[in-house]
Image: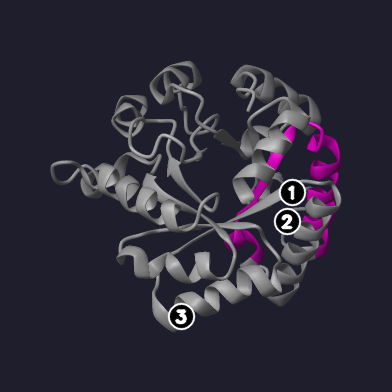
């Protein structure tokens, strides 16, 4: 199961770090407009960070923007991560249903060979099940890290993000070890409301670093022995020495609980 593999990688690395591979053109040597330059850059980042990262999260948009060569580099990057013995979460935030979602799943699982994917659940479980049926793990976006999301996810009683967590919990009963949540580090107070909803669901936590998430406050809000994975993208990719930056972030996040 994906969660078992993730926890094993956390034990191997002694940390909770996810390195987000968002190759913004301004941080790629040479400008990042050529797919081969992006590939070389990410190869170097993976080589320098693989001892500290338990998982990687390539952002599909930056590869798709480079055309067919960019998609080829994405597949090569996935292979490079797997060669390093690490898992891949494709950050694609898919959200369609039926045959369209199934096609997205085939692309992620069959073409790109990723292990997991991020999904927006606005259309309910129909937007999630095709990915789970394909064998992918799914991280369901419950509490985004950007402030504007509050206009949507705070709505209702209980708020929408709690209902999303409840949906994910029900799906996890049918697909054990394949379902997790995306919970932004920028909202530790709201994260407290989620801590008792599906207490065994792993959380992928964006918002550390460039978005200003408060790590200590969030760790206190998450509580328990939940599997937490903290994503850092620009804070590592834009660093002069990505390996040193990865190690610093990993140590700040603390060691995962033994399982």
Query: SS for tag 1?
Result: loop
| 107 left or right of 211 in image | right
Query: SS for tag 3?
Result: helix
Q: Position of residue 35 (x, y in %)?
A: 77, 64
Distance from the alpha carbon under mark 2 to that under mark 3? 30 Å
Disc number lying in front (2 or 3): 3
Check residue 28 in the rendering and tell me which mark sits there, or answer none: 1
* Between discs 2 and 3, the one toward the N terminus: 2
Query: SS for tag 2?
Result: loop
The answer to whether mark 1 and mark 3 are in CB contact below 8 A is no
Distance from the alpha carbon under mark 1 to that under mark 3? 33 Å
Residue under label 2, please give it. 32
The answer to whether mark 2 and mark 1 are in CB contact below 8 A is yes
Q: Position of residue 94 (x, y in %)?
A: 46, 65
Is 56 inside the magenta-drawn segment? yes
Quadrant, the C terminus:
top right
Q: Is residue 95 visible?
A: no
């Amino acid at each position: 199961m994906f969660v078992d593999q993730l926890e094993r990688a956390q034990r191997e690395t002694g940390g909770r770090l996810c390195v987000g591979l968002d190759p913004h053109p301004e941080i790629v040597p040479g400008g990042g407009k050529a797919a081969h330059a992006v590939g070389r850059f990410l190869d170097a980042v993976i080589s320098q960070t693989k001892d500290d990262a338990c998982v990687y999260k390539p952002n599909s948009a930056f590869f798709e923007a480079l055309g067919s060569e960019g998609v080829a580099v994405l597949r090569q990057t996935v292979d490079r991560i797997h060669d390093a013995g690490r898992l891949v979460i494709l950050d694609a935030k898919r959200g369609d249903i039926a045959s369209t979602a199934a096609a997205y799943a085939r692309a992620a699982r069959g073409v790109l060979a990723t292990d997991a994917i991020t999904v927006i659940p606005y259309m309910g479980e129909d937007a999630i099940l095709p990915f789970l049926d394909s064998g992918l793990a799914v991280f369901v976006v419950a509490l985004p890290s950007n402030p504007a999301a509050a206009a949507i996810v705070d709505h209702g009683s209980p708020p929408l993000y709690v209902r999303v967590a409840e949906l994910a919990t029900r799906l996890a009963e049918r697909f054990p070890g394949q379902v997790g949540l995306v919970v932004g580090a920028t909202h530790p107070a709201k994260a407290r409301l989620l801590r008792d909803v599906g207490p065994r669901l792993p959380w992928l936590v964006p918002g550390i670093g460039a978005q200003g998430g408060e790590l200590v406050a969030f760790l206190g809000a998450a509580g328990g022995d939940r599997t937490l994975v903290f994503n850092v993208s620009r804070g590592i990719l834009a660093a002069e020495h990505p390996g040193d930056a990865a190690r610093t972030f990993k140590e700040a996040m603390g060691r995962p609980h033994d399982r």
